[in-house]
């Protein structure tokens, strides 16, 4: 139940990102659900490998390169899907920042709602 609620909230967060920033376009809530799933899948499978491979650059930039990795995941998800579009890397960077902030708020809310 917790996973489904989080997924729906992340899809709504993606719609919020599209509403707040014109460089990100989401056609419908169904497209947002699929995009949220793909972003989560990429962050689970591909992101740890990229973080490990770019560890020296991440250390040199004091962790700021992680923002670039997040933007790449966001941009890659948009390039794979039809109903989700990002105009460029800058739009992916700003969109991923807003999406990450929304995700953090959702995680805190979920932790408080679903206490054991």
Image (cartoon, rainbow, N blue to C red):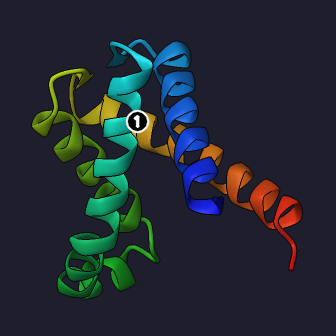
Residue 16: x percent and y percent?
57, 24
Would residue 76 be found to the left or right of residue 58 on screen?
left
Q: Residue at x 45, y 74 (%)?
A: 63
**Quadrant of the snapshot with the C terminus:** bottom right
Q: Horizontal and vertical percent for residue 38?
A: 28, 49
Label 1 packing within 10 angstroms: few (<14), some (14-19), many (20+) = some
Residue 84 at x, y = what percent?
26, 25
Question: Quick check: 17 left or right of 56?
Answer: right
Query: At 26% across and 78% down in the image, what residue appears?
Result: 57
Image quarter hosting the N terminus:
bottom right
Question: Residue drawn 33% across and 12% down?
Answer: 27
114 up-or-down from 55: above or below = above
Is 50 in front, or is 63?
A: 50
Mark 1 — residue?
33
Compared to residue 71, the image places residue 63 above or below, namely: below
Residue 18, x across and y down, in percent:
46, 19
28 or 63, which lies in front? 28
- Residue 69, quarter of the rendered image: bottom left
Residue closest to the far front: 1
**Above or below, 73 relative to 15:** below
Which secondary structure, mark 1?
Answer: helix
């Amino acid at each position: 139940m917790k996973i489904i609620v989080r997924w729906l909230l992340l899809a709504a967060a993606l719609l919020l990102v599209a509403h707040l920033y014109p460089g990100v376009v989401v056609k419908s809530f169904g497209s947002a659900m699929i995009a949220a799933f793909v972003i989560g899948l990429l962050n689970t499978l591909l992101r740890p490998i990229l973080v490990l491979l770019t560890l020296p650059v991440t250390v040199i930039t004091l962790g700021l390169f992680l923002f670039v990795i997040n933007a790449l995941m966001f941009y890659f998800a948009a390039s794979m899907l039809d109903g989700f579009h990002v105009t460029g890397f800058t739009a992916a960077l700003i969109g991923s920042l807003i999406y990450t902030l929304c995700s953090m708020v959702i995680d805190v809310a979920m932790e408080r709602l679903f206490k054991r």
